[in-house]
Image (tube, coloured by chain):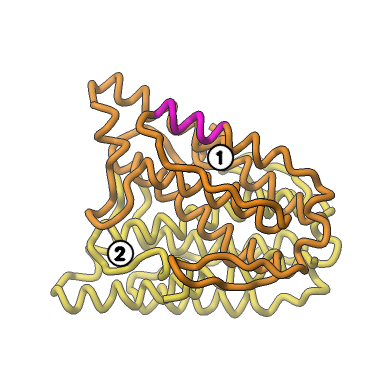
Chain colours: A yellow, B orange
Amino acid sequence: MSFHDATVPAFQQILGALSGILTKAEAHCKAKNINPDVILGSRLYPDMLPFSKQIQLACDFAGKSCARVTHGEVVAVPDTETTFEELKARLAKTIDYVKAFKPAQFEGGDAKDVTFPIGPSNTMTMKGQQFLNNFAFPNFYFHAATAHGILRHNGVEIGKRDFMGVS
Amino acid sequence: MSFHDATVPAFQQILGALSGILTKAEAHCKAKNINPDVILGSRLYPDMLPFSKQIQLACDFAGKSCARVTHGEVVAVPDTETTFEELKARLAKTIDYVKAFKPAQFEGGDAKDVTFPIGPSNTMTMKGQQFLNNFAFPNFYFHAATAHGILRHNGVEIGKRDFMGVS
């Protein structure tokens, strides 16, 4: 079992699936004559983050987590996307970034300390394995599934198979 | 890196967190004089599964996935829960079940084939590692995050920290 295999394919699958649900959301807007901005800014509750931010955060948790467990440079990506097309480009770029990591870069990373920011002024340190399982994955899947839930709530015809990327 | 470490703590964390959000949902119902059945039966869209089923499925994906990758008996748990308390008992039982797996039971399971049902009449076979990352985790987190989203949408005062179990 390699730490790379435990990490990269999981992110790849869901990032690809999110691109698929964006395509369906865009088609839904066209078919129903809905302004895409309505969906992109939609939330499940007024104090939650909107759809577009959920996608941006899913990208961040995938990309930055790979950088952290391989002890590479953590690159901050500005959140500039305002259309479905731009969000799909961000997802595509993140998929390419994640796919470019080599298994050798992950070797031993499961047992090495990872120090990462928690909120604006604190940091936390965990072993790579624990960081992946108890921080990176739950955050990543949280934003991905919330993005799915927002579209579902708005009537976009998707289901769990779309979330899994098998539809 | 052990396959057990990649599996059990992840399930444990989120199952425990779900128990915490159930406690908050129950308190919310009491404070706002809401019939708990309304929340337990709530959905993000009419053709989605209700809150209680999301919790039951999260339990199933945690418990059954551990059984599958360790090649133990896969036990079907009937979905009989109709109250917050009963759902919390199901979560507690699932946490105990998952915690009882020993690291030795997982040894080598990442490279062994797992055959599991896909829908009512099909099966699929994957290596244990792939099964965990590309099937068990995305399904598990999907239902956990959807449960969280349903509560959030209904005004229960929770956030991502509750989903992570750090609140």
Disc 1 + disc 2, Cβ < 8 Å: no
Overall secondary structure of the magenta section: helix
Judging by the rendered image, the residue that carries numbered circle 2 is A40
Q: Position of residue B73 (x, y in %)?
A: 66, 51
Judging by the rendered image, the residue that carries numbered circle 1 is B15
Q: CA distance from mark 1 to mark 2?
A: 30 Å
- Of the 4 image quadrants, the one containing the N terminus of chain B is bottom right
Residue A63, relative to residue A129: is it above or below?
A: below
- The picture quadrant where one finds residue A157 is bottom left
User: Dot 1: what SS?
Assistant: helix
Q: Position of residue A100 (x, y in %)?
A: 68, 79
Stretch in magenta: B84-92
**Co-location on one chain, circles 1 and 2:** no
Disc 1: host chain: B
Q: Position of residue B110 (x, y in %)?
A: 75, 64
Q: Position of residue B158 (x, y in %)?
A: 41, 35
Disc 2: host chain: A
Please state which of residues B132 and B76 is positioned toward the viewer in this rendering.
B76
Q: Nearer the viewer, mark 1 or mark 2?
A: 1
- The picture quadrant where one finds residue A148 is bottom left
Using residue A159 as the reference point, say whether residue B56 is left or right of it. Answer: right
Q: Which amino acid lies under the numbered mark 1 shown in the image of this protein?
A: Leu
Crowding near the residue tagged with mark 1, few <14, some 14–19, many ≥20 C-alpha atoms within 10 Å: many
Instruction: Residue B91: say if magenta.
Output: yes
Residue B39, relative to residue A50: is it above or below?
A: above
Using residue A121 as the reference point, say whether residue B50 is left or right of it. Answer: left
Residue A156, relative to residue A129: is it above or below?
A: below
Residue at left offset 49%, top offset 68%: B118
* Residue B38, numbered label: none
Residue at left offset 30%, top offset 52%: A43
- The picture quadrant where one finds residue B68 is bottom right
